[in-house]
Image: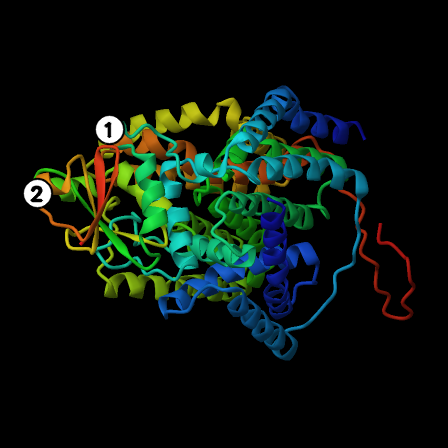
């Protein structure tokens, strides 16, 4: 019998040493998650993403762009800059948030985001355009 | 949130027919919890090929698979009903960490990089029936990965009725619960109630497992399925173990290395012990696991999806010391509750004292083999060994850690020479069966 007790104690010891902090962390996380609004939880990015971060743009894409559409992202610097930009963490977050819309790695989607520039600066004459901070969403 | 939780519960209930069919086919006694976890494993194997064929991982599809599985099980298997034997206090002790984790999971946002760039993003795209194979689509990353996890997540989203990726985290708690259930079922005949409860508490309260489960990455599901496969194969439930091994392979590529170690050790043990009659069963099992990966590999090959981050070579062999050092550092971290060192000490004590040496050797060999497999994979990395190890080692170590935690109750009781629990199965008398008689 004592051997069973010793075995149980050996196995329970690591749990006993950490249980308090584990439960504390869980309770803190539950409290933190429950305070988040839908936008904070589903749209606001978990990381900074520097100057690329633009939450109003994400909300705008979700509101304006049809579900079955794709969106191109057109930063300054032509094709090379675009290819680099669509591989950034920010664009991966954008891709996650705007599903079922897709991020088009190319430049020719009907819907496009002009990154850090206006349609005139990009030389584009859009059918419709919306400004979100330093970025513009355009329909071509 | 309530609607989401109801959806997750409905999704799990919808997996019962598929799980039941697989249990019938594998001649395993039916229990509801086991049917749910088996249904998850089977769905992760069966859904990806159907997704490749253009079908959506929807609720009707999973129910249809369940109907087919139950019919096949009744026709070709052996439906058996397991005895319901609930031990209330251990159940409460083991439910507590899962309930708390589920509460933490229910409203957790997707906030980890690979979750939104890869795993959950694929699940959302599958849920909305949006193809993501074209190179013209920017994210998700790693399209060459198997689709077992995103497929079952998309199925759960269908049951929830929306792309509620917050409540989806509850699914990962079910993986941990499923592993605890399998470990209890397999080990209970060999380990007393309280050492087993204490050992599985260690597994369920392990901070690394809890945090990583809610990262929505594939590492904890892989670990739970792989360790379940190990326990089932070791307890000679080869057919059911094969389903879980195939599910592990459908979850993440790491399973290739882990399963290679598991089957190599299994074959080696059978050859050393000259149990040639069991070689056939293990060979068929290995073939089935390999065959389950054929649709994935063919699909990747035909769509020009290649693994670019791992390329087996010895060119980084000089980094072995760094990899071992990093893994060694993690192994003794409190986040893993020292499961690996305690299990290793218990196995060594068993060897020294001559108690159940085959079990001790098997556990040590499997643990060392899994760590060696990780080292080989890391030194074969093409993106820089140190970067790869620093960014992923704490996740890949979860499989050996959960294996050690699951085996700990058995190893600790054997090392201490604790008595085995009395066999509760009714003894069959060749002359006159008597109800309630126990074998002592």
CA separation in Å, label 1 and label 2: 19 Å
User: Residue A34 or B80: which is nearer the viewer?
Assistant: A34
Residue where numbered disc 1 is placed = A51
Residue B74 image point, x, y percent: 65, 76
Please identify the quarter of the rendering in which residue B427 is found: bottom right
The structure's colour scheme is rainbow
Chain label for disc 1: A
Residue B245 appears in view: no
Residue B70 image point, x, y percent: 62, 73
Chain label for disc 2: A
User: Residue A120 or B199: which is nearer the viewer?
Assistant: A120
State the residue at coordinates (32%, 53%). Answer: A101
Residue B181 image point, x, y percent: 65, 48
Please identify the quarter of the rendering in which residue A122 is found: top left
Residue where numbered disc 2 is placed = A78
Q: Do labels 1 and 2 share a chain?
A: yes
On screen, residue A76 above or below B60? above
Going from N to C along the chain, the mark reached first, 1 or 2, is: 1
Q: Quadrant of the N terminus of chain B?
A: top right
Residue A42 image point, x, y percent: 43, 40
Label 1: how many Cα within 10 Å (few below 14, some 14–19, many 20+): few
Q: Residue B240 bears which disc, if any?
A: none
On screen, residue A123 above or below B386? below
Extreme residue in the bottom direction: B75
State the residue at coordinates (23%, 48%). Answer: B308
Residue A43 appears in view: yes
Side (left or right) of A130 relative to A24: left
Side (left or right) of B223 relative to B428: left
Side (left or right) of A90 relative to B148: left
């Amino acid at each position: 019998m004592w051997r069973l007790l010793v075995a149980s104690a050996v196995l329970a010891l690591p749990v006993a040493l950490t249980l308090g902090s584990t439960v504390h962390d869980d309770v803190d996380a539950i409290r933190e998650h429950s305070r988040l609004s839908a936008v904070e939880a589903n749209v606001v990015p978990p990381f900074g993403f520097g100057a690329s971060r633009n939450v109003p743009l994400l909300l705008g894409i979700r509101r304006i762009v049809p579900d079955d559409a794709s969106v191109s992202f057109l930063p300054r610097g032509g094709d090379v800059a675009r290819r680099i930009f669509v591989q950034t963490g920010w664009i991966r977050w954008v891709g996650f948030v705007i599903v079922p819309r897709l991020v088009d790695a190319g430049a020719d989607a009907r819907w496009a985001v002009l990154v850090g520039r206006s349609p005139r600066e990009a030389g584009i004459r859009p059918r419709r355009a919306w400004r979100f901070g330093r970025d513009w969403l355009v329909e071509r | 949130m309530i609607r989401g939780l109801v959806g997750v519960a409905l999704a799990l209930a919808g997996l019962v027919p598929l799980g039941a069919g697989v249990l019938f086919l594998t001649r395993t006694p039916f229990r509801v919890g086991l049917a749910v976890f088996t249904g998850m494993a089977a769905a992760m194997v069966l859904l990806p090929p159907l997704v490749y064929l253009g079908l959506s991982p929807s609720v009707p599809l999973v129910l249809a698979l369940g109907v087919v599985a139950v019919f096949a099980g009744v026709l070709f298997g052996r439906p058996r009903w397991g005895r319901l034997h609930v031990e209330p206090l251990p159940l409460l002790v083991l439910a507590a960490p899962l309930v708390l984790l589920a509460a933490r999971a229910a409203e957790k946002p997707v906030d980890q990089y690979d979750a939104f760039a890869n795993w959950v993003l694929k699940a959302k795209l599958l849920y909305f029936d949006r193809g993501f194979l074209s190179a013209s689509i920017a994210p998700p990353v790693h399209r060459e990965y198997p689709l077992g996890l995103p497929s079952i997540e998309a199925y759960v989203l269908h049951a929830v009725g929306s792309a509620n990726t917050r409540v989806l985290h509850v699914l990962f708690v079910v993986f941990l619960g499923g592993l605890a259930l399998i470990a209890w079922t397999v080990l209970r005949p060999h380990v007393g109630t309280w050492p087993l409860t204490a050992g599985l508490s260690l597994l369920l309260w392990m901070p690394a497992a809890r945090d990583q489960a809610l990262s929505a990455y594939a590492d904890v599901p892989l670990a739970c399925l792989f360790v379940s496969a190990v326990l089932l194969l070791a307890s000679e439930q080869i057919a059911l173990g094969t389903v879980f091994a195939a599910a592990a392979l459908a979850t993440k590529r790491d399973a290739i290395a882990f399963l290679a170690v598991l089957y190599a050790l299994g074959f080696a043990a059978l050859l050393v012990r000259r149990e040639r009659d069991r070689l056939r069963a293990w060979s068929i099992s290995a073939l089935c696991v390999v065959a389950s990966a054929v649709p994935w590999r063919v699909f990747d090959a035909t769509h020009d999806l290649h693994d670019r981050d791992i390329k087996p070579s010895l060119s980084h062999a000089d980094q072995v010391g760094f990899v071992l050092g990093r893994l060694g550092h993690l192994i003794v971290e409190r986040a893993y509750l020292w499961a690996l060192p305690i299990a290793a000490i218990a196995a060594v004590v068993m060897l020294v004292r001559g108690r159940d040496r085959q079990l001790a050797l098997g556990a040590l060999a499997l643990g060392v083999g899994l760590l060696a497999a990780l080292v080989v994979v890391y030194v074969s990395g093409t993106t820089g060994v140190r970067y790869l190890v620093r960014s992923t080692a704490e996740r890949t170590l979860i499989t050996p850690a959960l294996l050690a935690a699951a085996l700990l109750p058995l190893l600790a009781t054997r090392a201490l020479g604790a008595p085995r629990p009395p066999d509760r199965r009714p003894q069959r008398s060749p002359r006159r069966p008597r109800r309630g008689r126990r074998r002592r």
